[in-house]
Amino acid sequence: MRRHKYRRSAEIDITPLIDVLFMLIIFFVLTASFVQGKLDIDLPAADGNSSGIGKAVTVTVERDGGLFWDGTRVDKRGLRSLAETVNGRSVLVAGDRSVSYGTIAEVLSILRKGGVTSAGLLMQGENSD
């Protein structure tokens, strides 16, 4: 009588591999979406207190003089109309290190004309607390 040899098939279960690939794809898609909205400015360094920074509106001034209100590009007229809607909240001006003092002063003047009573300069550095 002849014996039959049973061959085991060399199958690999790829379900865990697909799960890992799926998680990696999700990770990279989410990471790319977070980086997309970031403004690239080089803040001047200083020590100070960062109390109340969470409630403040941020006005960003880029190297080329571009203005952003909480991440949305605006022009000088739009900045003044948005400043009128602040309703007592603080405004922080994040000006790039290479932007001239005159440009920052002009932004602060526009904010003041729009009714902003509390404006500060956002800087990079350690807290002194």
Image (spheres, rainbow, N blue to C red):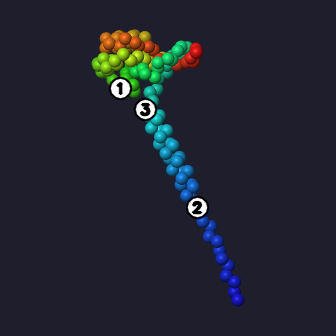
Q: Which residue is found at the position 52% from the left and 19% from the top?
A: 124
Of marks 1 and 2, the one in the foreground = 2
> Furthest-bottom residue in view?
1
Q: CA distance from mark 1 to mark 2?
A: 50 Å
Residue at 30% across / 17% down in the picture? 84
| 3 shown above or below 64 | below
Q: Nearer the viewer, residue 92 or 94?
A: 92
**Residue 63 percent across, percent down from the top left:** 43, 20
From the top left corner, tell me how far across and down residue 52 is, in percent. 47, 18
> In the image shown, does 83 or 44 lie closer to the viewer?
83
User: How packed is label 2: few (under 14 Cα within 10 Å), some, or many (20 or more)?
Assistant: few
Q: Which residue is mark 2?
A: 13
Residue 64 in sight in this render: no
Identity, as a three-letter code, of the amino acid under mark 2:
Asp
How crowded is the residue under tag 1: few (<14 C-alpha within 10 Å), some, or many (20+)? Answer: some
The residue located at (49%, 17%) in the rendering is: 51
Q: Secondary structure at mark 3?
A: loop
The residue that disc 3 covers is: 37
Query: Looking at the rendered structure, which numbered label has been put on residue 73?
Result: 1
